[in-house]
Amino acid sequence: MSTLVIAEHDNDSMNIATLNSVAAAQAMGGDIDILVVGTACQAAAAQAAQVPGIGKVIVADNGAYAHSLAENVAPMIAEVAAGYGHVMATATTTAKNIIPRVAALLDVQAISDVSGVVSEDTFKRPIYAGNLIATVKSSDAIKVLTIRGTAFDGAPAEGGSATIEAVASAHDSGKSTFVGEEVAVSDRPELTAADIVISGGRGMGNGENFDMLYSLADKLGAAVGASRAAVDAGFVPNDMQVGQTGKIVAPDLYVAVGISGAIQHLAGMKDSKVIVAINKDEEAPIFSVADYGLVADLFVALPELDAAL
Amino acid sequence: MKVLVAVKRVVDYNVKVRPKSDMTDVDLANVKMSINPFCEIAVEEAVRLKEKGIATEIIAISVGPQQCQEQLRTALALGADRAILVSSDETLEPLAIAKCLKAVCETESPDIILLGKQAIDGDNNQTGQMLGALTGYGQATFASELSIDGGNAMIIREVDGGLQTLTLSLPAIVTADLRLNEPRYASLPNIMKAKKKQLDTTTPADLGVDVAPRVTLMGVELPAERSAGIKVEDIAQLVDKLKNEAKVIS
């Protein structure tokens, strides 16, 4: 029984989210290979080869695979996957976009957001915004899974020296064209990888007030997130959203500021180790999951907190 | 231009779901059911395409039990022209649903297929992508903006890093994210009119689709419960607790 882990990368480097899938594969046992599909992605492949315990790294390097367009990448993955028992990718937006397409090409029912490995065919996953955990057993010959990153600590990144093998196939559907992207550039850590996350909600009032959170974050080496309400109100961009349909985070410390704690938000952060809530509404549901709650006006509390750090 | 929009019947998003007492599945007895919120956004987008004069016909489709007629009537009240129910009492997985949708695409030949990006019951986030694989059409998931220009669709997608813009040649599949639009409410006259609109029923067998499940639900459990901690008096006490008790900041 062997597992193919699909690397998430930007061609120049491998995203460490990939290591969560490697950890999930290791939890199941068996041989593990990594597949890197990209354009001029040899640097990312070389990084993948350093992950300890990997049999080989398979590289599909072709111009058609730039920007990870699902129509082109999915058939490439499906072609390689045919020889494996399991295909795994960490549930980023890239994987969520591509992996179900791979599964359907293989005539397999994919299993999304796996949070636990029970055995090689049985997995745990959250349903209903994490209000229940389902145990599901797959009867498909190839198990195609996306992995919830926060549920598996990342495997080590260095120390291995796997062989790198190229596959030549090119799949170019011509159905979709990449036009451009707007990527937020920040010196702060990435939300899903940060040890500390500070999030603001509707209570922040406007986008300028998030500067108070950025200042705190820079003192703590934290990432800044937001509730859906704050994103919908246009305070901050969509890539900051934490929740059921945004990013799932589980840092050592999560500070929720001016966030009431809708169930969809809790779904994205309740596995954090320590949760702090600052809200002026004593009845806010966020306090029911917070280890430390402070009932206070955030416009008074945040400057005080900033000064105290 | 013809639009096919898929809707799923799910537990209303305000309902706090509970497991059955034997922990075999979620307890759906006497629970309010609604149209999946992301599907509602997809329907709204279809209606806006028609209002802009781009779409000429909107067909709403649902794959599931007879009761899905309620959600199809909602879609009709919101502005769909007619509806198709692929009726089945089986537990339907995304792959089976995608196969049924593909079969209907073959007879209806829509130019664009709109779906919600995920349903809030199973949280699978798969059906649109699977339909893409089965039809060979291009796909744009997690759409926050859609425009049509001749034979192409331009879509802005919400991705982890920010926003990505794609063009797809039609026919194409688009799955709706939260910020694509804000769905309207159906007006009473439109709800009345919807009752008279055409709703055809077919079955997976009629469509030649095998919907046998590939995945078995072994049981459900409640997640580890987080209990409320303490309330601190002020920032000084909070900082002290974080440094000396939780030891998460230094």
Image (cartoon, helix red, strand yellow):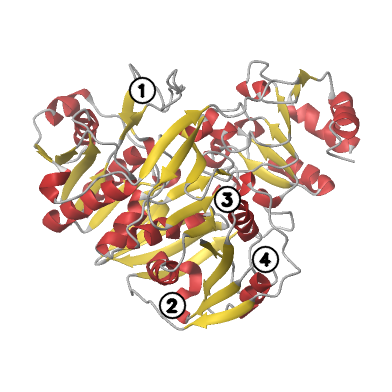
Residues marked 3 and 4, same chain? yes
Disc 1 packing (10 Å; few <14; some 14–19; many ≥20): some
Contact flag, marks 3 and 4 (Cβ < 8 Å): no
Disc 4 packing (10 Å; few <14; some 14–19; many ≥20): some
Between B163 and B199, which is closer to the camera in this rendering?
A: B199
Mark found first going from the N terminus, 2 or 3: 2
Image mark for residue A64: 2
Write the residue at 53% across / 52% down.
A91
Mark found first going from the N terminus, 2 or 4: 4
Alpha carbons under labels 4 and 1: distance apart: 45 Å
Q: Amino acid at mark 1?
A: Leu
Alpha carbons under labels 2 and 3: distance apart: 26 Å
The image position of residue B30, as x and y in percent, is 33, 16
Image mark for residue A53: 4
Q: Secondary structure at mark 1?
A: loop
Write the residue at 59% across / 74% down.
A57
Picture quarter containing residue A20? bottom right
User: Vertically, is A226 above or below A299?
Assistant: below
The image position of residue A234, as x and y in percent, is 55, 43
Relative to A45, B208 lies left or right: left
Q: Which residue is mark 1?
A: B28
Q: Which residue is mark 3?
A: A239
Is residue A207 visible to us here? Answer: no
Between A305 and A53, which is closer to the camera in this rendering?
A: A53
Disc 2 packing (10 Å; few <14; some 14–19; many ≥20): some
Q: Chain of mark 3?
A: A
